[in-house]
């Protein structure tokens, strides 16, 4: 294992890494950083949660010349949330060298961005649509760019950003260094790399070495109609601190988060149709732990790094193995353990086997818990809370009242009442969700995902022709 100080990084950058709590490099970092520092073009493939941001972030910050006031690094990301997250990490890495990084994304006031650009950020992290806007307005110039990074490249292509990326890459000087990071390596990425990269070195970290290892993977077979009730029992039984729940469609996410709230769970939904302000606020609440269950579509949750996610629930089994790997990559991050539970209807069992074949991991079948078991799970939590308070907290001022109570009522009755108050009992409120069947057609992933996602991506809306044509041609297709 190479440590960060053995990679030829400067003292300022090593200090930043230490202050971020990174002790040793992850496998992708170990292999990419030394090559990137030599100026090589790179393709880095590793699963989510393996530290790809720092893999490009460290050499990127290292290569910035502080004597030049121009933008020298451009990172492209598929979503706004990811742009913000990557910019935050780059700002941390650049804190001692004083390299400032600005996120630029659609949905944010452009004048505000223009003002921020006047402060001379050396690095821009942008979603492709908004960056092109700034290029047209000449508020961002890319003539001095030395490094370009494509982060989550597969997802950008899935979202239909390929022409935008090409347009942007044509604007940056040809002698630039290009780094491409992606969790998967489908054909279109290889094509893009052939056109825009110079003899890229390919570094691929095998899936089995990473996150999935820390995540226990279970499944529960249950008919569609009982799924929600069974899911609630599982929640009661497992009592996750912080969990992400995946739904198949935006409607599903809306219905599911509403249904969970009705039953008394602390849940909020997130998907591409919500306003930026709403998405930000939901994510903030989730990060703070005010909201315990984040209900999301694949796209909304892609690439987000939220620490402390203990459980992932695939309320709907994903369509393809790649999404599965991404979803469960939201937990068990940076060496911590996680639990992933997938709900599968009898009709969908083939999808599950397919995932198992590709990930080469068997999911463990778990029985449907009974309502009694779910109740016992909640009761156990109440008891733990009670014992914790009894042992750890200052309860002197309650003792007088307790003694008085015990003179009138026996201790078992009193303690039972206290436990009842503390136990979250399943709220039997009836809930019905609209059924969302999986896609029937087995078209290749890239083709299938591209158009519907492109259409719902707010960044692409209202965009000038000729880019908008393709989305329209498929307007009769369902959105996923
Ligand atoms: P990816 O882009 O591969 O999905 P991220 O770059 O988002 O992964 O990193 C996942 C998490 O791991 C982040 O919280 C990040 O701060 C942390 N991390 C990255 N590199 C290291 C390291 N070398 N040591 C410890 N934690 C790390
Ligand atoms: Mg990433």
Image (cartoon, grey):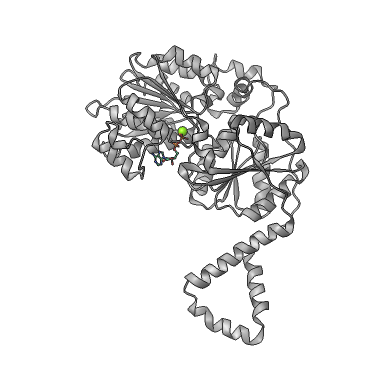
Number of numbered discs visible in the structure rendering: 0
Residue 34's spot in the image, x, y percent?
32, 27
Query: What residue appears at the point 57 percent right and 39 percent down from the top-left corner?
Result: 328
For the C terminus, the quadrant is top right
Residue 392 versus residue 408: which sits nearer the camera?
392
| Location of residue 135 by image quarter | top left
| Location of residue 37 by image quarter | top left
Left-right relation of 126 to 427: left
Residue placed furthest toward the left? 67
Left-right relation of 384 to 335: right
Query: What residue appears at the point 66 percent right and 19 percent down from the top-left corner?
Result: 474
Above or below, 107 against 269 in this view is above
Left-right relation of 464 to 442: left
Can you tell me which quadrant of the image ligand 1 is in?
Answer: top left
Residue 164's spot in the image, x, y percent?
48, 19
Does residue 81 appear anywhere in the picture? yes
Residue 38's spot in the image, x, y percent?
30, 22
Above or below, 75 against 164 in this view is below
Left-right relation of 171 to 244: left
Above or below, 244 against 29 in this view is below
For the N terminus, the quadrant is top left
Query: What residue appears at the point 43 percent right and 28 percent down from the top-left corner?
Result: 126
Does residue 103 appear anywhere in the picture? no
Residue 346's spot in the image, x, y percent?
76, 37
């Amino acid at each position: 294992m190479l440590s960060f100080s053995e990679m030829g990084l400067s003292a300022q950058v090593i200090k930043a890494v230490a202050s971020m709590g990174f002790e040793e490099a992850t496998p992708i970092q170990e292999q990419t950083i030394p090559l990137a520092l030599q100026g090589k073009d790179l393709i880095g493939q590793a699963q989510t949660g393996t530290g790809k941001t720092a893999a490009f972030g460290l050499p990127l910050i290292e290569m910035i010349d502080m004597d030049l006031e121009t933008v020298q690094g451009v990172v492209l990301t598929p979503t706004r949330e990811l742009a913000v997250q990557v910019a935050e990490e780059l700002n941390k890495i650049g804190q001692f060298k004083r390299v400032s990084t600005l996120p630029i994304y659609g949905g944010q006031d452009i004048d505000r961005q223009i003002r921020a650009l006047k402060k001379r950020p050396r690095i821009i992290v942008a979603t492709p649509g908004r960056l092109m806007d700034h290029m047209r307005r000449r508020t961002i110039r890319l003539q001095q760019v030395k490094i370009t990074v494509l982060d989550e490249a597969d997802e950008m292509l899935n979202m239909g950003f390929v022409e935008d990326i090409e347009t942007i890459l044509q604007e940056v000087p040809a002698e630039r260094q290009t780094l491409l990071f992606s969790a998967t390596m489908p054909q279109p990425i290889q094509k893009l790399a052939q056109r825009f990269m110079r003899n890229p070195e390919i570094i691929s970290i095998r899936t089995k070495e990473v996150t999935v290892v820390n995540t226990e993977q279970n499944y529960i077979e249950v008919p569609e109609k009982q799924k929600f009730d069974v899911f609630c029992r599982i929640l009661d039984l497992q009592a996750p601190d912080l969990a992400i729940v995946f739904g198949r469609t935006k409607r599903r996410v809306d219905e599911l988060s509403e249904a969970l709230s009705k039953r008394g769970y602390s849940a909020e939904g997130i998907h591409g149709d919500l306003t930026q302000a709403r998405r930000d606020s939901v994510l903030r609440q989730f990060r703070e732990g005010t909201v315990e269950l984040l209900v999301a579509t694949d796209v909304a949750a892609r690439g987000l790094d939220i620490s402390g996610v203990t459980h992932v629930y695939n309320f709907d089994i994903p369509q393809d193995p790649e999404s599965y790997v991404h979803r469960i990559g939201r937990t068990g991050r940076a060496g911590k353990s996680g639990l992933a539970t997938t709900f599968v209807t009898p009709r969908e069992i083939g999808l599950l086997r397919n995932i198992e074949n590709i990930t080469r991991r068997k999911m463990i079948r778990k029985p449907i818990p009974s309502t009694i078991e779910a109740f016992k799970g909640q009761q156990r939590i109440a008891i733990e809370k009670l014992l914790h308070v009894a042992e750890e907290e200052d309860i002197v001022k309650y003792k007088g009242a307790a003694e008085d109570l015990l003179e009138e009522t026996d201790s078992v009755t009193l303690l039972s009442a206290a436990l009842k108050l503390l136990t979250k009992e399943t709220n039997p409120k009836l809930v019905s969700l609209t059924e969302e069947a999986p896609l029937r057609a087995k078209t290749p992933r890239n083709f299938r995902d591209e158009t519907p996602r492109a259409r719902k991506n707010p960044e692409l809306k209202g965009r000038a022709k000729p880019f908008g044509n393709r989305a329209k041609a498929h307007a009769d297709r369902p959105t996923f």
